[in-house]
Image (cartoon, grey):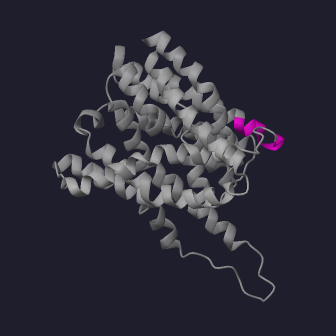
């Protein structure tokens, strides 16, 4: 229980730092946000994923934990997408953003301290990271890129008679797969599998840069909250509620059913699986939405609401299964 409280406390304090920075320097906040987004996306986040994967014994997590994370997220994501598309009648772009926000777990930030303190192992965290970064991130980013390309294609011609530039289809597909985070994750997995080690003079700076990713990302999210009023956009309230229910109720329930009945887990291993599923949405989703210039209000509100409600959800899981 102490590990759960510690993990959430650290995250909330750093988010508050970002919020305070935007409040104290409101005229500088937009510049800080524009500067931090590419730095995190292209440099610090890839370094963090490389370090996490390289330092993990992948054989211990691929057999059980990763399949559970994959199956859970697929079922939850499809549930959101079907309801959003055919009941709420949302666009493909809005459905994709909401589906990712309702299933992409904050494993790298909150998950690491919670797993280490409450479960005693980082295996559940790494399993989620593998599923998300090597499978789900490329898929969702490909969809985001397709939506961005489609939106560019339907833009009206400019006054000078020129048509907006449309990215070639092959580049639309390849760019998400070759994004820095996915590539760094693949390299880290390869280093783990082969036992390759870099010289300390190279590895130490990579670790230092990677360790900067989490606080920078949390501060960026805190800055984005300043001046915003979550849930004020009435047209998105149903979407936000749907995403939050999928994230904090459906995903943990699916993880428990799949882990217990399909993979025969019990005790601490099962607790680790369900706790990871009950974590809030990762701030990375907001970063991805911003990077692809998508409407990020829905994503931001799901992150905010799931972050506020995840602590009681995780505490309930720990109480029932701990």
- Residue 264 is situated, as x and y percent measured from the top left of the image, at 33, 19
Seen from this angle, which residue lies furthest bottom?
A: 160
Which residue is rendered at x = 26% and y = 42% of the image? 55
**Residue 216 visible in the current orientation:** yes
Query: Is the magenta region chiefly helix, strand or loop?
Result: helix
Residue stretch in magenta:
233-240
Task: Tell me if 43 is positioned left or right of 285 in this view.
Answer: left
Q: In this view of the protein, which residue sits in the foreground, 144 or 196?
A: 196
Task: State yes or no: residue 25 in magenta.
Answer: no
- Residue 283 is situated, as x and y percent measured from the top left of the image, at 56, 43
Q: Is residue 141 above or below residue 63?
A: below
**Residue 85 visible in the current orientation:** no
Seen from this angle, which residue lies furthest front?
A: 24
Q: Is residue 60 above or below residue 202?
A: above
The quarter of the rendered structure image containing the C terminus is top left
When asked about the image quadrant of residue 293, the answer is bottom right
Q: Is residue 164 above or below residue 224?
A: below
Which residue is rendered at x = 75% and y = 39% of the image? 230
Which residue is rendered at x = 38% and y = 22% of the image? 117
Task: Tell me if 31 is positioned left or right of 124 in this view.
Answer: right
- Residue 158 is situated, as x and y percent measured from the top left of the image, at 77, 82
- Residue 179 is situated, as x and y percent measured from the top left of the image, at 44, 61
Task: State yes or no: residue 236 in magenta.
Answer: yes
Q: Is residue 295 above or below residue 236?
A: below
Q: In this view of the protein, which residue sits in the foreground, 297 or 198?
A: 198
Which residue is rendered at x = 52% and y = 56% of the image? 141
Q: In this view of the protein, which residue sits in the foreground, 135 or 45?
A: 45
């Amino acid at each position: 229980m102490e590990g759960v409280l510690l993990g959430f406390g650290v995250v909330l304090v750093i988010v508050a730092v970002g919020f305070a920075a935007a409040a104290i320097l409101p005229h500088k906040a937009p510049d800080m946000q524009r500067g931090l987004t590419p730095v995190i996306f292209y440099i610090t986040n890839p370094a963090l994923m490389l370090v996490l994967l390289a330092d993990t014994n992948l054989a211990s997590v691929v057999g059980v934990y990763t399949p559970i994370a994959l199956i859970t997220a697929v079922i939850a994501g499809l549930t959101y997408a079907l309801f959003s598309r055919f009941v709420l009648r949302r666009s493909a772009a809005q459905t994709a953003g909401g589906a990712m926000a309702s299933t992409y777990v904050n494993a790298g930030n909150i998950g690491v301290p919670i797993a280490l303190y409450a479960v005693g192992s980082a295996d559940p965290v790494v399993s989620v990271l593998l599923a998300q970064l090597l499978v789900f991130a490329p898929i969702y980013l490909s969809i985001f890129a397709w939506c961005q390309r489609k939106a560019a294609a339907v833009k009206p011609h400019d006054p000078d008679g020129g048509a907006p530039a449309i990215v070639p289809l092959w580049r639309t597909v390849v760019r998400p797969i070759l994004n820095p985070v996915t590539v760094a994750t693949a390299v880290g997995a390869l280093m783990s599998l082969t036992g390759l080690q870099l010289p300390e003079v190279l590895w130490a700076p990579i670790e230092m840069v990677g360790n900067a990713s989490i606080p920078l990302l949390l501060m960026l999210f805190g800055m984005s909250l300043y001046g915003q009023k979550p849930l004020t956009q009435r047209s998105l309230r149903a979407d936000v509620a749907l995403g939050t229910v999928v994230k904090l109720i459906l995903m943990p329930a699916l993880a428990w059913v799949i882990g217990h009945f399909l993979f025969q887990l019990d005790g601490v291993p099962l607790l680790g699986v369900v706790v990871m599923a009950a974590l809030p949405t990762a701030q990375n989703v907001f970063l991805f939405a911003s990077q692809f210039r998508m409407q990020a209000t829905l994503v931001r509100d799901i992150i905010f609401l799931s972050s506020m409600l995840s602590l009681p959800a995780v505490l309930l899981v720990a109480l029932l299964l701990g």
